[in-house]
Every structure is written in C-alpha cells, then in structure tokens.
Amino acid sequence: MSITDLLGAEDIKKAVAAFAAAESFNHKKFFEMVGLKKKSKQDVEKVFHILDKDKSGFIEEDELKFILKGFVPDSRDLSDKETKILLAAGDKDGDGKIGADEFTALVAES
C-alpha cells in the first residue's frame, strides 16, 4: 500500500511544497492539508504503518526527521528543531517515540 492509496497526490504535493522552506514545518497544518485530518482512525493507522519505515511499531526520532519523504520521496528532511517539536507533540508517554495510538491522537488534535 502506498500513501497515495489513502491520500490525494495533489493534496500531498501542495502540502509538502507549503513547507519546503527550512524551519517552516507545522504538523497541524500539514496533516490538514494532506487530508489526513478527515480520514478514519483506521486510515490514519495505515498511514502510520507506511511512515514506520523499520516496521518497529513506532516512529522514532530518526524516522520523524524524514517524515516528509514518506509523503514525497524527494522532499526535504526536517531540521533537528522541527523533529524535536513534532516528537514532543506526539510522544504522550515520554518514551522517545510515537506509537500508532499516539500518532492517531496527534492527527486528531491537529
């Protein structure tokens, strides 16, 4: 399954382009722009599993840095600051990674 099976390719392109500048990433706006906010919990979980590149059941800090590449392969990496902000927003239990439930909650509160 690919990300475009769940989200519109044009929406993804527009969202990634909107945050092309360094230090501009805003996960709340991004999740809304790609259409993730309108998806069911099941679809959000499917996107989580696509973004969980090592299939560990968690999106760790090193995977978060490349989250935009999960949507568009040639997009930029998040800065360390952007990555830490995203991790802090999503890591509800403080274990240093984002699980599927934390990801769905992060999207829902965006």
Image (cartoon, rainbow, N blue to C red):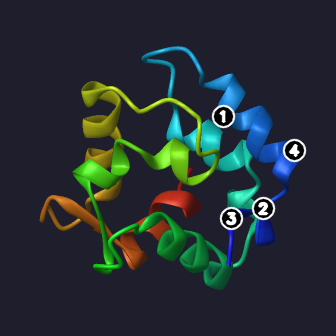
- The residue pinned by badge 1 equals 16
CB atoms at circles 2 and 1 under 8 Å apart? no
Q: Residues within 10 Å of mark 4 (few under 14, many from 20)?
A: few
Residue 74 got which mark? none
Looking at the image, is 55 positioned above or below residue 26? below
Location of residue 26 in the rendering, given as x and y in whole percent from the top left corner = 52, 32
Q: Amino acid at mark 2?
A: Leu
Task: Tell me, yes or no, whether the two marked residues, 3 and 2, touch with CB atoms within 8 Å.
Answer: yes
Which label's residue is closer to the chain start, 1 or 3?
A: 3
Q: Secondary structure at mark 1?
A: helix
Which residue in the protein does label 2 denote? 7
Q: Which residue is mark 4?
A: 10
**Marks 3 and 4 close (CB-CB < 8 Å):** no
Exactly how many numbered labels are in the figure? Answer: 4
Q: Could you say which is closer to the camera, residue 10 or residue 38?
A: 10
Q: Amino acid at mark 1?
A: Val
Q: Quadrant of the N terminus?
A: bottom right
Q: Which mark is residue 3?
A: 3
Please determine whether, in this image, residue 23 is positioned above or below residue 8. Answer: above
Q: Spatial distance from mark 2 to mark 1, Cα to Cα? A: 13 Å
Q: CA distance from mark 3 to mark 2?
A: 6 Å
Give the distance between the C-alpha atoms of the residues marked 2 and 4, in whole angstroms.
9 Å
Label 4 element class: helix
N-terminal label among 3 and 4: 3
The local crowd at label 1, few if under 14, some if 14 to 19, many if 20 or more residues have their Cα within 10 Å, is: many
